[in-house]
Image: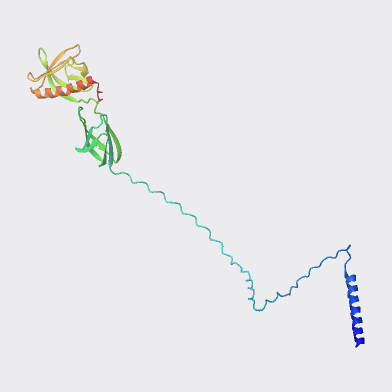
Amino acid sequence: MNRRVLVVALVAAVLVGGSVLFFVVSQPSPEEPQPVSTPRASARSRAPAPARGAAPAPSEPAPRREKAEPPPPPAAEAAPAAPAAEPAAPTLGRLRIAADVAGAQVFIDRRFVGAAPAVAEDITPGTHQLNVAAEGFDSVAMPIEVAAGEREIVVKLREVRLDSHIDVVHRHGVGSCRGRLVATPQGLRYETSNRDDAFAAPLADLETFQVDYLAKNLRVKLPKGRQFNFTDPDGNADRLFVFHREVEKARDRIRKGDTPAVN
């Protein structure tokens, strides 16, 4: 029994001494540091098996190759835009009627349009009658030509208009002559084949312009000139009276400053 214990103790002592010696010899020198090698994982090394009862790790899906899309077809060239349709040409007339007297009444073909300035819509092309009137002024009546589209008309009521004439007989001291009296805004003239009796004078310059209805006579005296006595060839005093009234009205307006119209 003691022998066996002794052998075991001897063996243990030898093992302990060898281990100490091996440890001392195997230690690296402090002056020469040894590189530390990193163990490389084997390419065939497997991942550690999951613990029992644990859910298996999901496997990574293999990368999916994207299918190459075909290139888009070339864009079709845009068709040129169609030109914008032109507005239809007007077929009716449109009149803008103004007057030199504000509020003058405007009529077309005896139909009241409005007070000037007035606008007449949808007038058929052709000839129409225009009438413009204002209190204190002679009315204006004239034909107008209307075409498709817009037109502006200015009526001058303040202009003095006069176009009157009458056949007369000029009685001399001895004998007589026949002719015609013509009155316009520019004056009064006597047209006759007797050149010595013919004359022309501005309306405002007449010294005498009188009618005697009972005597059926129209007396005219020129400025610083002759005096004429006219009668109607048929002895009609009415024609002399109407002629005198129209001329006298124009003379009165000219004296007030209204502008004579150019005939």
Q: In the figure, 69 relative to 219: above or below?
A: below
Relative image position of residue 22 (x, y in whole percent): 89, 73
Q: Is residue 12 left or right of residue 201?
A: right
Q: In the figure, 14 relative to 163: above or below?
A: below
User: Quarter of the image holding residue 72?
Assistant: bottom right
Q: Is residue 54 left or right of residue 108?
A: right
Relative image position of residue 190 (x, y in whole percent): 18, 19
- Judged from this view, the residue extending furthest toward the top is 224
Q: Please tell me which residue lies in front, 164 or 8.
A: 8
Quick one: quadrant of the C terminus? top left
User: Quarter of the image holding residue 8?
Assistant: bottom right
User: Quarter of the image holding residue 93?
Assistant: top left
Q: What residue is shown at x 90% (from left), y 70% (from top)? A: 24
Q: In the figure, 67 relative to 260: above or below?
A: below
Relative image position of residue 172 (x, y in whole percent): 11, 14
Residue 109 in sight from this viewpoint: no
Relative image position of residue 127 (x, y in whole percent): 23, 38
Q: Is residue 198 left or right of residue 83?
A: left
Quick one: quadrant of the N terminus? bottom right
